[in-house]
Amino acid sequence: MIPRNIYVDVENTLTVSFISGIQRVVKELLVQLAAQPKSDFVFIPVVHCRYCHGWRQLSDAERTSLYSSGSPGKSVSAHSQMFRRLAGKLLGENASATLREFRIWCQHVQEHKKLRLADFASGSIFLDLEASWHNPLLRNSLLPALRRNGVSVVTLHYDIIPILFPDRTHRNTVRVFTRHLHAHLAHSDLIICISHHSELELIRYACQQVGHQQLNTAVLRLGSNIRRTVAPNTRWPLPKDISKFVLCVGTVEPRKNHEILLDAFDAISQDYPDLGLVIVGRLGWDSDRVIKRIQQHSRYDVRLFWLQNIDDDTLSELYRRAYLNVVPSLYEGFGLPITEALQCGSVTLSSHAGALPEAGGDFVTYFDPNRGDELASRLRELLEDLAQYKERKSTLDKYVPTFWEQTADELRAVIRKHF
């Protein structure tokens, strides 16, 4: 039996300089899919190249970046930086940009010639796995063209947060996401959702707002195990006297609702002078107010810490050492910070919004994301009632995580069942 090619667009994951939830899903899944080549499917990571006017496979450097567990970053040599500054000064920014384009084109001619792909063969599958609504190649033109050529389209759907919370999402993201979603609703053969809640929200939106009565959907369980770096270089990021702390993992942006956590921490911190608060996450959109509040806090870098760009080893250790893990989000399509924390044995408090209860089940204590006083009360209970805390901790021994290997197997099974 000849394996069926599944082409996976990874442009966004390779382009951005950070690893958030979606990029983690893409990288973890593709590592597992590549590790089991003997299958009825062959998953081929690709990017669309405007110089090639088509698709190409990855370079060795891109492949290494994709399959590593850290952030891709953007490495630029000292000579390249010097060239850019000198060209900008001598020729002006427009001429400098033209020279950069020429240099990239020359590099493209040398490197991409052997990587170019012919058109995807009829009968193959195009898998949209990442945050491709930001990609230059628009799905409302790409997907119908693929379908006309006999290529099936599958997408992994995370949530419709930009539509549900337009006031808490960048205006341009709302625009490009909505266009991207409508293209997939019209042209995808199969939409795989990351939770039952996300699936129901999608179906409701498609029926009520767009008029699509029939969607082929499925649900995929995401993995929770954090893949460790190959060569650990872990340096503990907190002062030695911080032995008891509350952990919060997630991009610092309005929807993640860090302000309610800060309110709760301020309400109880005087009664627990040895308690720390550790926020882990990159700087997101429209976060000036909360960042200012964090950095101007009287206990900043003393009992309140904001960590960015940490590796998976450090994140795992933070989960393990945390007294409590808190997820205060106003909405999530799933909730990796819950499942990762539970897998690491961290007692967790979470908002009851979106799919978070689906991710945490009975292993998590929930609160109203609009009630800072309720969160403060939950924190006090678990700080003062050691018997309750130990009971919550002991129940985590029964937690059975989903591993990324299982997620990859389920993805193959879902595609196999449909096609």
Image (tube, rainbow, N blue to C red):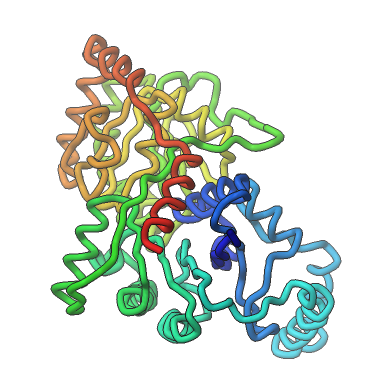
Figure quadrant of the N terminus: bottom right
User: Residue 35: percent from the left, percent from the top?
Assistant: 62, 45
Can residue 299 be seen? no
Q: Is residue 104 left or right of residue 367?
A: right
Which corner quadrant of the image does residue 294 belong to?
A: top left
Looking at the image, the residue that sits furthest to the top is 387
User: Residue 266: percent from the left, percent from the top?
Assistant: 28, 34
Query: Residue at left 28%, top 36%?
Result: 360
Q: Who is closer to the viewer here, 138 or 403?
A: 403
Q: Who is closer to the viewer here, 305 or 357?
A: 357
Can residue 72 be seen? yes
**252, above or below 227, in the image:** below
Which corner quadrant of the image does residue 394 belong to?
A: top left
Figure quadrant of the C terminus: bottom left
Which corner quadrant of the image does residue 418 belong to?
A: bottom left
Q: Is residue 348 left or right of residue 278?
A: left
Q: Who is closer to the viewer here, 317 or 167?
A: 317
User: Residue 312: percent from the left, percent from the top?
Assistant: 56, 38
User: Residue 252: percent from the left, percent from the top?
Assistant: 40, 51
**387, above or below 8, in the image:** above
Query: Residue at left 48%, top 47%?
Result: 408
Query: Residue at left 60%, top 46%?
Result: 36
Q: Is residue 136 left or right of residue 104?
A: left
| Count of numbered badges drawn on the protein | 0
Q: Who is closer to the viewer here, 113 or 226?
A: 113
Query: Residue at left 81%, top 76%?
Result: 107
Looking at the image, the residue that sits furthest to the front is 1
Q: Is residue 58 left or right of residue 407?
A: right
